[in-house]
Amino acid sequence: MSEQQPENSTPQPRPTLSILAPVYNEEAVLPELYRRVAAIMDSIGETWELILVNDGSRDRSAEVIAGLHRQDPRVKGLSFSRNFGFQIAVTAGLDHAQGDAVILTDADLQDPPELYPEMIAKWREGYDVVYGVRASRVGETWFKEFTAKIFYRLIYRITDVDIPLDTGDFRLMDRRVVNAIRRMPERNRFLRGMVPWVGYRQTGVPYQRQARFAGESKFSSVRQMLPFAIDAITSFSYFPLQMATYFGFLIAAISAVAIVVVIILRLLGPHPLTGQATTLVVVLFLGGVQMISLGIIGEYLGRIYDEVKGRPMYLVDKKWGLEDSNQ
Ligand code: UDP
Ligand code: MG
């Protein structure tokens, strides 16, 4: 994709593990991320690479990645041409990771590298996916915690895949899971659902979700979280579409009863249901329901349009130590 030659082109043997972190304005955390990942991975004697996908950061993240790569060629990275979003950044990372297993983590050290040995041990036991289960969260707002709780439980109820409760994106994936995900071509990607969808043997290990090392959360307001929630639901459930059907049946049943009631009232005496207000309220209510149903169809239709266009998922600007995506 990129014509640029990798800066550090000594051929590296394939590492056993790829640590993958998407990066959006994380200049302050990257050196510390590298330090802690290197410390833990070297202490357990595994071969590894750290892949940093710079998702169009507006700070000096790209320079920091370049610097870390010069210092240690096991740090590799790529920069997008602009911000494509978390899910796509992870996708690009999976396209370039060489390891027999990939550990996906936040760049901000909310997911402690010290958990890797436990995840790797489970992987060696034969699990294909080892996800981190958030036993507790440190330093997050009650709003985020509360909405996360509701969101996971809602998703769990209405989607068709068993998305494990209280898990984020922090997880180890075996090569065959990574390859399976790479075969899923959808543009509206919701990895927290795609990984369980793949199947194989999956398990969780509990951990304490840490506070951010530095910088700010990119997903803290409703405006930032809502599109994510809608993608999650539309990617894995037809329930919103079916709601229109259920509602239609309900209204039809109520009106069938109402017709009989009105006829009887009419036979018993003059002028049952007088006034325009009743009619108006019913019409407005049904108008609202119809608009909402159209909106829901629109959400799905727009996503189908995204898929049909078949645009490339991301465009690469620069690469450090990475070849073109491995097929
Ligand atoms: N991120 C990204 N692209 C974006 C937004 C976020 O690559 O458009 C990265 C970010 O740098 C971090 C990870 O995704 O490594 C998770 O984001 P963040 O930590 O802000 O979210 P939170 O953990 O608060 O939910
Ligand atoms: Mg984070």
Image (cartoon, rainbow, N blue to C red):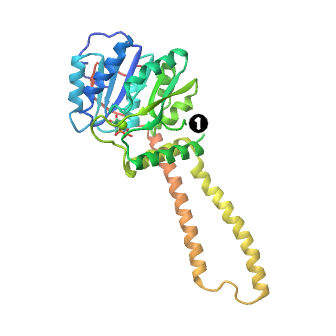
- Quarter of image, res 31: top left
Residue denoted by label 1: 162
Which residue occupies 47% across, 40% down?
307
Horizontal arrangement in the rendering, residue 106 relative to residue 158 (left or right): left
Residue 202 to residue 144: above or below: above
Name the residue rendered at 30%, 16% in the picture: 74
Residue 182 drawn at (x, y percent): 47, 27
Residue 183 percent across, percent down from the top left: 50, 27
**Element class at badge 1:** loop
Total of numbered circles in the picture?
Answer: 1
Whether residue 312 appears in this view of the structure is no
Q: Is residue 320 above or below residue 151?
A: above
Q: Name the residue at 60% across, 73% down.
A: 282
Residue 220: % across, % down: 36, 46
Label 1: few (<14), some (14–19) or many (≥20) C-alpha neighbours in 10 Å: some
Q: Decide if ligand 1 comes within 8 Å of the CB at mark 1.
A: no
Q: Observer-nearest residue: 60 or 271?
A: 60
Give how far across and how far down residue 20 sits, in percent.
37, 26
